[in-house]
Image (cartoon, rainbow, N blue to C red):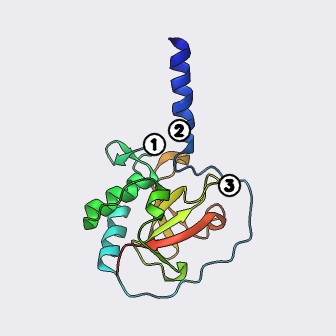
Amino acid sequence: MNGRRGLVLALASVALLAACGTPAPTRRAKVKPILYEPQPVSEKGNEVALYAMGLIDIGYQFGGKNPEAGLDCSGMVSYIYGKAVGIRITGSAADIARRGREIDPRTLRPGDLVFFNTLNRPFSHVGVYIGDGRFIHAPSSRGRVRIERMDNVYFAPRFEMARTYFD
């Protein structure tokens, strides 16, 4: 019985480390900065960004889909879009990356989604863009929903794509 319990704990630990992983920076890469172009306002996008800001400091939880239980990156996006604008988005960060409309990163607006390769696999992390080169996400490292900059030494070289669900 103890062997089975140990195996279950080991598998749970591996799963926790693999979800929306954002380990500490290990290298500095020269990255071409995104030069943002002013865009028309999206009312729904602004609602999403404002709602996301209300979740800052909520704890991380692998598989978490609501603030009471904790949130992981894809659970946070699903929760925000559902509550703020009534759009149902489900699945992992990679699943979410397959939906919506791909946009040029220079045209990001608040409420759009930004995707990163943080686990050496495409689209392993997602966040909500809030404007001014910043996004909100639920990282497993340091375990709290927080704001990061797109030009952050860790995230800039891992940025993969931007998507929108709005006009």
Determine whether the residue tagged by mark 3 lies in a helix, strand or loop.
Answer: loop
| Closest to the observer, 53 or 11 | 11
Q: What residue is disc 3 on?
A: 25
Q: CA distance from mark 3 to mark 1?
A: 21 Å
Q: Position of residue 95 (x, y in %)?
A: 45, 58
Residue at image position (68%, 55%) is 25
Q: Is residue 134 above or below residue 43?
A: above
Specify the quadrant of the image occupied by residue 82. bottom left
Contact? badges 1 and 2 (CB < 8 Å): yes
Closer mark to the observer between disc 1 and disc 2: 2
Amino acid marked by disc 2: Ala
Determine whether the residue tagged by mark 1 lies in a helix, strand or loop.
Answer: loop
- Which is more N-terminal, label 1 or label 3? 3
Residue most extreme to the top: 1
- Which is more N-terminal, label 3 or label 2? 2
Q: What residue is disc 1 on?
A: 62
**Residue 113: mark:** none
- For this view, does 41 lie left or right of residue 155? left
Q: CA distance from mark 1 to mark 2?
A: 8 Å
Residue at image position (45%, 53%) is 92
Binning the other alpha carbons within 10 Å of mark 3 as few (below 14), some (14 to 19) or many (20 upward) gives few
Q: CA distance from mark 2 to mark 3?
A: 20 Å
